[in-house]
């Protein structure tokens, strides 16, 4: 028979043969193949970097898995850097492996995340909401200040705006979005853009 | 102390029976329970809190479980969820961990002495009371998901 193992909302997508799934919320991330995540470099072991992705094991990232990287032309990665990449291998039996290139060898937005900015953690449900097409939160925020945003499926968000104060305001709004309804959020943003 | 250790072991056995550890090999799951106030029925309170914590964390579970405490009074009447005073005056205090699929018994522990028939009666009462606890879980989870 069929057993449901997590609590959540049952969702249905009629398109393409129809699919049912349980939409559950949790804060702990479990690596899944193909997910784009933000990792923090914790160690350099020879030809491989060890990244903390918030799972139970550190992920490995080869230095050749960057766009345009060769044995002579190594990427400039230091311990403590932030990397945006996707999982090549992720299952419960093996150590997860990440790469910063897609199937055709292009970086496609992945790689080392630049200097400054702010990294913080939210629940996985909020990330999925933000990644949905035409997300209202992102549209409303972009009318407030211009900013750069990287969303990792492991619950990590990196934000960079022009000044530190603007960055922190965006961080606080995104963190509060978990518990605010749409009206409360619109009110908070109206107050911020008014002052 | 020994009492806390025995409670830990009972909780651990119950959790190990429902958590799908196969999906997370080479992983440790740590459950920390902090007693804020103890007004009786502590073990079943810990069981309920543990189940809600596992639900909230999103760990894959084969079934839910709840804890129910029965106090058998000297005159033979069964009291559910006894207070500390009622537990002390009782002839026997039985705690059951009941699973959500077919109300199976996952764990049973007794303090004091009672006959087999009395234990069966307490078990039946506990299985009946488990419905109320599972409904409470459902309402709490529904409230949480209604916000998003």
Image: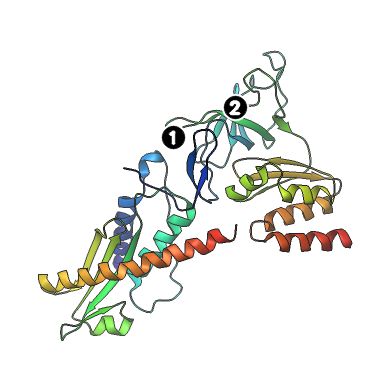
Asked if residue B138 lies left or right of residue A187, the reply is left
* Towards the viewer: A186 or A164: A186
Q: Which residue is at the far right?
A: A195
Residue B140 coordinates in the image, percent (x, y): 48, 65
**Is the residue at mark 2 from the same chain as the one at mark 1?**
yes
SS at mark 1?
loop
* Towards the viewer: B24 or A105: A105
Quarter residue B74 falls in:
bottom left
- Residue drawn at point x = 40 percent, y = 61 percent: B50
Identify the mark nearer the N-term, 2 or 1.
2
- Residue drawn at point x = 24 percent, y = 58 percent: B104
SS at mark 2?
strand
Asked if residue A84 lies left or right of residue A2, the reply is right
Which chain is mark 2 on? A
Q: Residues within 10 Å of mark 2 (few under 14, many from 20)?
A: many
- Where the N terminus of chain B falls, by quadrant? bottom left
Asked if residue B27 lies left or right of residue B78, the reply is right
Q: CA distance from mark 2 to mark 1?
A: 18 Å
Callouts 2 and 1 close, C-beta under 8 Å: no
Residue B15 coordinates in the image, percent (x, y): 34, 54
- Residue drawn at point x = 73 percent, y = 50 percent: A136
Residue A15 badge: none
Above or below, comparing residue B129 to residue B39 in the picture: above
Residue A61 badge: 2
For label 1, the residue is A92
Above or below, comparing residue B44 to residue A175 in the picture: below
Asked if residue A53 lies left or right of residue B71, the reply is right
- Residue drawn at point x = 64 percent, y = 21 percent: A65
Which chain is mark 1 on? A
Front disc: 2 or 1: 1
Q: How many marks?
A: 2
- Where the C terminus of chain B falls, by quadrant? bottom right
């Amino acid at each position: 028979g069929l057993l449901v193992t997590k609590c959540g909302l049952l969702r249905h997508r009629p398109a393409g043969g129809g699919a049912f799934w349980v939409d559950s919320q949790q804060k702990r991330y479990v690596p899944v193949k193909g997910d784009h995540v933000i990792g923090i470099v914790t160690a350099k072991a020879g030809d491989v970097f060890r990244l903390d992705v918030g799972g139970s094991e550190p992920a490995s990232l080869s230095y050749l898995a960057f766009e345009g990287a060769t044995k002579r032309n190594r990427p400039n990665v230091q311990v403590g850097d932030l990397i945006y990449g996707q999982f090549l291998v992720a299952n419960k039996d093996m150590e997860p492996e990440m790469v910063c290139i897609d199937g055709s060898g292009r970086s496609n937005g992945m790689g080392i995340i630049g200097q400054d900015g702010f990294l913080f953690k939210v629940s996985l449900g909020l990330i999925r909401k933000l990644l949905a097409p035409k997300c209202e939160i992102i549209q409303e925020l972009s009318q407030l200040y211009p900013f750069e945003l990287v969303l990792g499926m492991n619950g990590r968000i990196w934000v960079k705006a022009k000044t530190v104060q603007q960055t922190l305001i965006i961080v606080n709004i995104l963190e509060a979005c978990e518990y605010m309804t749409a009206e409360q959020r619109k009110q908070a943003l109206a107050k911020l853009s008014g002052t | 102390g020994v009492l806390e250790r025995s409670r830990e072991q009972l909780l651990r056995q119950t959790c190990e029976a429902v958590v799908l550890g196969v999906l997370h090999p080479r992983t440790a799951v740590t459950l920390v329970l902090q007693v804020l106030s103890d007004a009786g029925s502590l073990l079943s309170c810990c069981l309920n809190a543990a189940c809600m914590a596992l639900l909230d964390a999103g760990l894959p579970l084969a079934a839910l479980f709840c804890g129910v405490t029965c106090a058998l009074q000297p005159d033979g009447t069964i009291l559910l969820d006894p207070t500390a005073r009622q537990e002390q005056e009782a002839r026997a205090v039985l705690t059951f961990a009941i699973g959500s699929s077919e109300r199976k018994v996952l764990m049973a522990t007794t303090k004091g002495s009672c006959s087999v028939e009395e234990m069966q009666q307490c078990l039946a009462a506990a299985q009946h009371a488990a419905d109320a606890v599972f409904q409470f879980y459902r309402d709490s989870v529904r409230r949480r998901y209604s916000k998003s």
